[in-house]
Amino acid sequence: MSRVLASILAGCLILAVASAAGAGIPDPDQSSIAASTGGLTTCPLGDGPAFQYVTVTALRSDSTPIQGIDSSNFFFSATGGSVTITAVDSQTDVNGRIRFEVVSDESITFGNSVTIDCSIYTIALSSSVDVDCNSFDIDGSGSVGLADLAFFAGDYGTSAGRSDFDWNGTVGLADLAFFATHYGH
């Protein structure tokens, strides 16, 4: 049996099990993915803090929510950078919503974004979400050093997005603490 045919049959089996279990089949046009406020903060070592969550809402074609879809039935693809997406919730709630944490695996420079697409079972959602990014490596040199500290110091007390590592709209003490943790990476 070809891999394509096997994949199609596996997808049909998953949808049949979901339908029999009463969960229902998600409608790709009614269901959606959305980003929380804020964005990703990255580091050249790939250990930036995660402040970004995506929420997927699973709805039937009549717009009613689908409760109880396990997190293992959600699949993601990302373009624009390497990210890891892990479940925060174990399954969809009564509103059909489930949250996932997004963490960058590499340094993505300020001003870039990562586009995330989602499939539930084998059904690709019609919507995608863009996640904004900044980096402790403000100057884009590949390491967090003195030049980055100078840029950060100039941004302190302002609303400069490139140094707002906690995504609260102001460059302050929390951002300095995050920056200090990554200095030298």
Image (cartoon, rainbow, N blue to C red):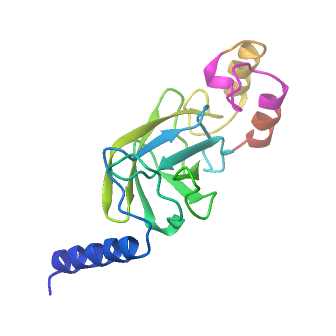
Residue in the picture at 83% in, 35% down: 177
Q: Does residue 83 lie above or below 24 as drawn?
A: above
Residue closest to the eye, 132 or 105: 132
Q: Does residue 43 lie above or below 65 as drawn?
A: above
Q: Does residue 141 lie above or below 159 as drawn?
A: below
- Dividing the image into 4 quarters, which one contains the C terminus? top right
Q: Does 63 appear in magenta?
A: no
Farthest residue to the bottom: give it. 1
Q: Quadrant of residue 127?
A: top left
Number of marks in the rendered image: 0
From the viewer's perspective, tell me whether residue 143 is left or right of residue 96.
Answer: right
Q: Name the spot of residue 123 as percent of width and height, x first.
A: 31, 59
Q: Name the spot of residue 86 as percent of width and height, x first.
A: 57, 59
Residue in the picture at 72% in, 22% down: 152
Residue closest to the eye, 155 or 67: 67
Residue in the picture at 40% in, 41% down: 80
Segment tinted magenta in the rendering:
160-176
Q: Does residue 32 lie above or below 4 as drawn?
A: above
Residue closest to the eye, 81 or 5: 5
Q: Name the spot of residue 170 as percent of width and height, x first.
A: 73, 19
From the viewer's perspective, tell me whether residue 164 is left or right of residue 121.
Answer: right
From the viewer's perspective, tell me whether residue 97 is left or right of residue 122.
Answer: right
- Dividing the image into 4 quarters, which one contains the N terminus? bottom left
Q: Name the spot of residue 96 as percent of width and height, x first.
A: 51, 53
